[in-house]
């Protein structure tokens, strides 16, 4: 659990490699799966931002907090949604992570997926319990975002899920 100057632990670095073996070894040796670095990133944030599902599974099984927020209030869900990792979204949802969480700017992860025009992520979120009518602090919904981007596939999909 020793930290570098930027506050990262060996587990932070191991999570970013995608190699499950060192992550498993560190967890078995007692590494704190919820340790934060100077930016409040946990190893789970890093695994989700890099799309490493095997590492994510190990961390979640070891008790990593899927709702932990970084300095900007973003969770692992925000990273997975914004970067296009649908398998990560599904794994987080199955672990009971709230998909409707908003970051410090009150932006829900589903809006990030819609604005990046990633239908696969939008589907993964909606089919795993995300609120398709969630609003940001200005009242913007996923449907309004989809209309703004002009992505007809996302508009049609959201409409089929009852989005307004």
Image (spheres, grey):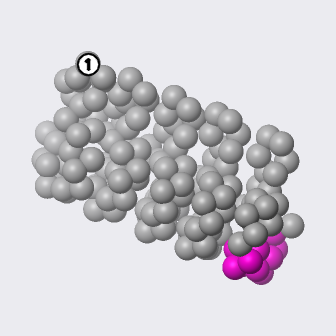
**Quadrant in the rendering for residue 26:** top left
Residue at left offset 43%, top offset 27%: 39
Residue 72 visible in image: yes
Residue 6: x %, y % from top left: 30, 23
* Left or right: 27 in relation to 34: left
Q: In which quarter of the image is the N terminus?
A: top left
The chief SS type of the magenta part is helix
How many neighbours does mark 1 have within 10 angstroms: few (below 14), some (14-19), or many (20 or more)? few
Residue 145: x %, y % from top left: 76, 59
Q: In this picture, is 128 found above or below 52?
A: below
- In what element is the residue under mark 1? loop
Q: How many marks?
A: 1
The question of residue 154 being in magenta is answered with yes
Residue at left offset 51%, top offset 29%: 71
Residue at left offset 49%, top offset 50%: 79
The residue range painted magenta reads 152-163
* Left or right: 116 in relation to 154: left
> 153 or 48: nearer the eye?
153
Residue 128 visible in image: no
Q: In this picture, is 101 found above or below 155?
A: above
Residue 75: x %, y % from top left: 52, 44
The question of residue 36 being in magenta is answered with no
Residue 48: x %, y % from top left: 40, 53
Q: In which quarter of the image is the C terminus?
A: bottom right
> 81 or 28: nearer the eye?
81
Q: In this picture, is 156 found above or below 110?
A: below
Residue at left offset 60%, top offset 73%: 119
Name the residue beneath numbered marker 1: 5
């Amino acid at each position: 659990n020793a930290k570098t100057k930027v506050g990262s632990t060996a587990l932070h670095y191991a999570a970013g490699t995608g190699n499950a073996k060192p992550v498993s070894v560190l967890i078995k040796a007692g590494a704190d799966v919820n340790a934060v670095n100077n930016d409040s990133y946990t190893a789970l944030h890093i695994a989700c931002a890099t799309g490493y599902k095997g590492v994510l599974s190990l961390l979640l099984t070891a008790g990593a907090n899927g709702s932990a927020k970084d300095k900007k209030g973003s969770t692992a869900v925000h990273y997975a949604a914004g970067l296009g990792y649908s398998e990560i979204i599904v794994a987080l949802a199955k672990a009971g992570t709230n998909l409707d969480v908003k970051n410090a700017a009150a932006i829900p992860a589903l809006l990030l997926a819609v604005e990046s025009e990633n239908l696969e992520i939008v589907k993964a979120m909606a089919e795993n319990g995300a609120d398709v009518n969630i609003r940001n602090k200005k009242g913007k919904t996923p449907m309004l975002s989809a209309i703004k981007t002009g992505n007809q596939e996302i508009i049609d999909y959201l409409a089929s899920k009852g989005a307004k």
